Each structure stands twice: as C-alpha cells, then as structure tokens.
Amino acid sequence: MILAFDFGGTKNTCAAFERDAAGAYQLAALERRASPPDADGAYDYATMCELARGLLRGRAPDAIGVSFGGPVRASAGWVVLSHHVPGWENTPLRDQLASLFETRVVVDNDANVAALGEARFGAGQGCASLFYVTVSTGVGGGWILNGEIYRGANELAGEIGHIVIAPDGPPCVCGRRGCVEQLACGPAIARMARERLLREPARGEILRAWVGENTAALTAQQVNDAAQQGDALAQQVMADAARALGFALGNVIVLMNPQRVVLGGGVTKAGADYFENVRAAARANVMPELHNAVDIQPAALGDDAPLWGALALVS
C-alpha cells in the first residue's frame, strides 16, 4: 500500500493506493477533512497522521508521497512555509513522517505534484512539456519537462501566483503588490465582489439577495453561482479573475512555450466562460507566432490530481 498526503490550505486529504491484479495502482480509499479557520501546522500534521492511521488499520505503508500547499525544498523534504496556514515554517516534514511511519517519504509542492499527476495519469499524458496551474485558496504552478518535475535552481520554479501583473494592485501575502494570486484566487474573487458591491450599490442583485448586508461572508463559490444565474456584477468579477490568470499565462507561454497548460483547483470549475476568458487573455498577451500554441485545458483528475501525483512521486 502507498499512501498519498495532500496538505491543502483549507483541507487535508489522505489516500491509499493498492495494486490490482494487473499490477496497476488503483485508488483504494480516501479521507478528507476540512481545517478550522484557526488551524496551524501542528493541527494539520496531527490530522493527517490520524487520517493515515485510519486507512492503514495497522498495516505498514510501502511509501508515502506528500503534496504540500506551499514552497518546499524537495531535495531535503523541507517545508519552507505555508502562505495560508501558520506554523509550518522550516519544517523537516519528510524526516518527521519517515520516522513516524518507518517508510520512505517524498515531499514536494502541491502544484509540482499535481502537475506530475496530470502528466502521468491525466490531461497531460503524451506531452513532453506541461505547465500545471492550481487556482483555489491560492495560485500555484508546476513544470513538467521531459516527463519529470522541473524545480529550478532554488527549487521554487513555477510560482506563477507571485508574478506581479499589477504593480499598484492589492497587497499580497508575499510582501509585494499586484501578484496574480491577489487577482485570481478564490479569496481574491470574494474580495473583489465585496468591493464592487460597496462601490456599486445598484448592482449585484442576486449576490445581495443571498448575503444581504453581510458581504464579509461572501464566497467565491457564491460569486460564480451568481454569475451562472446572470448576475452582471458577478460575471464581471469572474471575467476579471480569469483575464488576470490568462494574462500571466501569456507571459509563461512566451517565455517557455509549453506544449500544454492544464488548469486545476476549485476556481477552475467555474465553467466554459471562465476558460474562454482565460484563453482569450492568454492569446492577447503572446506574440502572433504563438497564438496557435495557446493550449489551455482543464485538469482531468480534478481535486485528486495531487494524490495521483503523490503516488507518482514514490512509485
């Protein structure tokens, strides 16, 4: 049995993979648990270990692959930090888990791991080069070149969420302003909708009917749902978020010319209009010779991409 851990910004997931009669790994069991708003690294670590013990039922895992939602020094199995969950700073996660479960452990950034999962098992099969982007609580990216994760000289390649596209834009958790993450992720969508509701009191009828004066409770899912039902303000917010991501992807395509870009994460489930806005913005931001190279596709593995990628890390 191989275990796959996915430490996310708002939830933690543990999966068990076992070989079938033909020798191929199949997903045998999965447990997800949402994290409370005040969760820290110690809470998430304890939660994941509890989920793992529940799936193992006394068995010893053959290996553990770990997807972590934040910068990781993969060669050392060392978590640098989480931008969304405090208490993870400079954590030797690989060694901690290897000691606890007495098995081989490989740890990497969630976008890198999901990229590997899509390349091996999903929308990137057959692609020599792939850029994967996850858009959910934050925005991250991972490169696959010649079938392997490309991590860069400092093991931080792919951090598209912290490319600045609006220097005078909103402040980011990284300390700068106008990063892609602050214009395209789920919390950013909710924030932008709240700001527009305050600025434009005659618009956003559907959103206002749902949240009333309590705009602080507004979520990105509600914004997208309202957009799907015809709320013009919500539609504009979703389009702005998609265009911000697409603009950044245009820069990526010009710089590296990947065979395919794959988008995953909760925000990317927003529907066909979202993807068309992303693609249009990307095409508008590449030189004409690359217009036909803009191949942007939805992830095939959905929320399970990091789990399949974690399997690929150790199998």
Image (cartoon, helix red, strand yellow):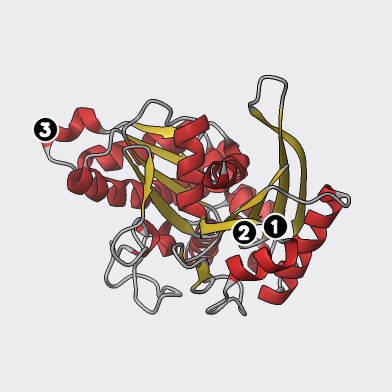
Observer-nearest of 132 and 288 = 132
Report the disc number at residue 150: none
Image-based side of 27 in relation to 261, left or right:
right
Where is residue 50 drawn, in percent x and y?
82, 61
In this picture, is 248 found above or below 80? above
Image-based side of 78 in relation to 16, left or right:
left
Where is residue 65 drawn, in percent x and y?
60, 51
Crowd around label 2: few <14 · some 14–19 · many ≥20 (10 Å)? many
Report the disc number at residue 289: 3
Q: Which residue is mark 1?
A: 12
Image marks 2 and 1: residues in contact by CB distance under 8 Å: yes
Counting every numbered tag in the picture gives 3
- Disc 1 is placed on an element classified as strand
Q: Is residue 168 visible?
A: yes
Q: CA distance from mark 2 to mark 3?
A: 38 Å
Where is residue 46 drawn, in percent x and y?
77, 69
Crowd around label 3: few <14 · some 14–19 · many ≥20 (10 Å)? few
Image quarter for residue 44?
A: bottom right
Sequence order check, earlier mark of 1 and 3: 1
For marks 1 and 3, give the one nearer the viewer: 1
Amino acid type, label 1: Asn
For marks 2 and 3, give the one nearer the viewer: 2
Quadrant holding the C terminus:
top right
Q: Residue at x 52, y 74 (%)?
A: 81
Q: Residue at x 36, y 63 (%)?
A: 155
Q: Which residue is mark 2?
A: 8
Amino acid type, label 3: Glu
- Disc 3 is placed on an element classified as helix
In this picture, is 88 found above or below 293? below
Q: Residue furthest top?
A: 22
Q: Residue furthest right?
A: 57
